[in-house]
Image (tube, helix red, strand yellow):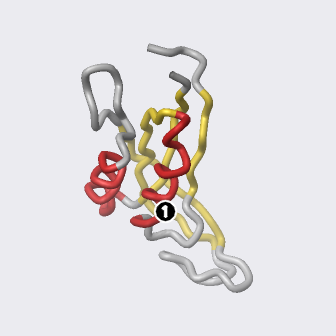
């Protein structure tokens, strides 16, 4: 079955909500295991422009804050519902979600 990896950048305070959202759409299902993901601490930097309504920071100022990068495997057929589940709980106006196709299966 074709799959991809999602990299999701989110405040650490939202990790539990994200885990539940991913589990609800069977993201992170690998063989006889589910809810498989990994995360690491990172630092995010951005600047809110125009009509943006940032979760953190101010208009036209560089903002830097701790985040976590969550990595999870998703079946390609579940990609759209997984993206919607993430966006439903994500606090950012423009969540950063990278989609990376995987060549290895099984």
Q: Which residue is nearer to you in this view: 20 or 61?
A: 20
Single out the residue that lies furthest toward the right.
50
Image-quadrant location for residue 61 = bottom right
Image-quadrant location for residue 14 = bottom left
Identify the secondary structure beneath mark 1.
Answer: helix
Q: Residue at x 55, y 32 (%)?
A: 4
Question: Could you tell me residue 89's position as x and y percent?
Answer: 39, 65
Q: Is residue 5 left or right of residue 41?
A: right
Question: Could you tell me residue 63's position as x and y percent?
Answer: 56, 70
Question: Could you tell me residue 51's position as x and y percent?
Answer: 69, 85
Label 1 crowding class (10 Å Cα cut-off): few <14, some 14-19, many 20+?
Answer: some
- Which residue is the site of mark 1? 87
Q: Residue at x 28, y 37 (%)?
A: 35
Question: Could you tell me residue 21's position as x and y percent?
Answer: 34, 54
Q: Residue at x 62, y 29 (%)?
A: 101
1 relative to 27, above or below: above
Q: Which residue is nearer to you in this view: 95 or 48?
A: 95
Give the position of the C terminus as an image quadrant: top left
Q: Is residue 22 left or right of residue 71?
A: left
Q: Which residue is nearer to you in this view: 28 or 57?
A: 28
21 relative to 64, above or below: above
What is the total number of numbered labels drawn onto the structure image?
Answer: 1
Q: Residue at x 45, y 33 (%)?
A: 73
65 relative to 6, above or below: below
91 relative to 98, above or below: below
């Amino acid at each position: 079955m074709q799959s991809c990896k999602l990299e999701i950048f989110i405040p650490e305070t939202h990790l539990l909500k994200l885990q539940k959202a991913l589990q609800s759409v069977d993201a992170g299902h690998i063989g006889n295991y589910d809810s498989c993901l990994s995360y690491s601490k990172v630092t995010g930097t951005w600047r809110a422009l125009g009509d943006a309504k940032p979760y953190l920071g101010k208009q036209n100022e560089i903002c830097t804050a701790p985040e976590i990068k969550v990595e999870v495997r998703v079946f390609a057929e579940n990609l759209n519902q997984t993206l919607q589940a993430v966006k439903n709980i994500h606090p950012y106006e423009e969540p950063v979600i990278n989609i990376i196709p995987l060549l290895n299966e099984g």
